Amino acid sequence: MAIRIDYRWMVPPLAAAQVESYRGLAASVHGGLAARRKAGSLPFYDLPRQDVPAIERFAAERQGSFDDLVVLGIGGSSLGLLAVNAALRTPFPRLEPAPRLTVLDNIDPLRVSSLLGALDPRRTLLNVITKSGDTAETMSTFLVFRKWLTDSLGERPARERIVVTTDAAKGALRKIASDEDLAAFTVPDGVGGRFSVLTPVGLLPAALLGIDIRGLLAGAASMDRRLASPDLMENPALLGAVLHRIGYDEGRRISVMFAYADQLYLLADWYRQLWAESLGKRRRLDGTERPVGPTPVKALGVTDQHSQVQLYRDGPDDKIYTFLTVDRFAAAVPIPAVGEAAGLDAVAYLGGHSLEELLAAEERATEAALFLAGRPVARIAFPEVSPQSVGEYFHLMEATTVAAGALFGIDPLDQPGVEAGKQYAYGLMGRQGFAEMRRELESLAPGDERFLFTGSE
Ligand code: PA5
């Protein structure tokens, strides 16, 4: 059974006539994207049909040889895998089956040294993932881990515990991998980090963890078939993009992804990066400087009902809500009856129901409360959380994002703002060729002293 995409409670509040007015533009956006896909400039669309025997072979060879898989990567090189692992193995690190996954997507020294102190180098497999092969965070932790492995095991055995995923030719990591004869996989050309979960970036570690990667790809392929029509009303990616565009123009510039299952929460986190980094742009395709970008927010049901929903329902009408729900959970937890004791009416009604029922009721109630307050609400319903449904979701959201990029008149595939931050950091750390960036930062005025509180007398 396929995931259901339900936009009925978006229209109204958004006007049906407005949606209709986008029919022509949506068809031409679809045509433009299809032409670029055919020309090979949007290769993410075709990832669902790739062959994966090399990944499966490597995973089979390494099976049983490690207790800990440590992935070094950041942004598009880590968030997809984290989402897949939480959805398809467990969202609870404490309950994770062997082998354990640790994704080191931060360089917090306490996190890194605590992890090194807890790992056994003889039972650790390291997957270093960076498309550019140069990212300072990933490469610095790689250097730390490589030394740790080499010091503990010696050079050759250390090399056998490393596999890298990077560009076919460019970047420092590719060079190191060739020089040191490390096992290596390639991020296909033209697939950017946040669109790369269905490349070896996500698929290799997923396969090493025993996840059904063919199921993920089959789900994405079936969603691709559902997105073939240029007709707005028959293509949920086009319609989702149009609804967000209309909402944005009316001032609903925040997009809340509300996951009603712990397993789905990191899918919302993955979406947060995809939407923010793809659509937050200063320049439009026509060359004008007109900053644009909806702000994605993730929320967890029911937890955030007691944290965010007051704002969502009664605060400014500046948000669009997408609920992620599950029809059939993999576990059933009945709620025991409380007996006949007097004065317990406030809990007696719960007995005989289940946590799944309560969760579904709370989700439905929250959706309805928002809709009744005039807020646009969409729902993506997973029949169950499976490799197929997760693959469908990835492809749907990626296709919606590039369609939204076309409607906003921006390039969803670049990230000049992220690159600028990387370059300033290179400058500060003394990388050759980036001295100008360092000078620019050092020449910044410190600002008005009256606004600084140091705590000194
Ligand atoms: O989506 C993107 O392009 C970024 O988030 C990158 O994935 C992130 O900056 C990491 O880059 P790299 O994979 O080159 O290390």
Image (cartoon, grey):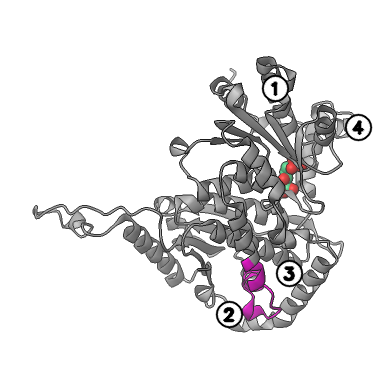
The answer to whether residue 75 shows anywhere in this view is no
Q: Disc 2 or 4, which lies upstream in sequence?
A: 2
Closest to the observer, 350 or 89: 89
User: Ligand 1 closer than 8 Å to the CB at disc 2?
Assistant: no
Q: Position of residue 374 (x, y in %)?
A: 48, 71
Q: CA distance from mark 1 to mark 3?
A: 52 Å
The 10 Å Cα crowd at callout 1, few under 14, some 14 to 19, many 20 or more, is some
In this picture, residue 247 sits left or right of residue 87: right
Q: Which residue is mark 2?
A: 15
Q: Which residue is mark 1?
A: 157
Task: Judge whether residue 238 is colored magenta.
Answer: yes
Q: Which residue is mark 3?
A: 407
Q: Which residues are magenta?
A: 222-244
Closest to the observer, 71 or 431: 71
Viewer-nearest of discs 2 and 3: 3
The 10 Å Cα crowd at callout 2, few under 14, some 14 to 19, many 20 or more, is few
Q: Position of residue 43 (x, y in %)?
A: 78, 59
User: Ligand 1 closer than 8 Å to the CB at disc 1?
Assistant: no
Element under label 4? loop
In which quadrant of the rendered view does residue 174 lie? top right
The answer to whether residue 341 shows anywhere in this view is yes
Q: CA distance from mark 2 to mark 4?
A: 52 Å
Q: Compared to 456, does 183 lie above or below?
A: below
Q: Which residue is mark 4?
A: 433
Amino acid carrying label 3: it is Leu
Viewer-nearest of discs 4 and 1: 1
Task: Judge whether residue 6 is colored magenta.
Answer: no
Contact between marks 2 and 4 (CB within 8 A): the answer is no
User: Ligand 1 closer than 8 Å to the CB at disc 4?
Assistant: no
In this picture, residue 150 sits left or right of residue 270: right
Q: Disc 1 or 3, which lies upstream in sequence?
A: 1
Amino acid carrying label 1: it is Pro
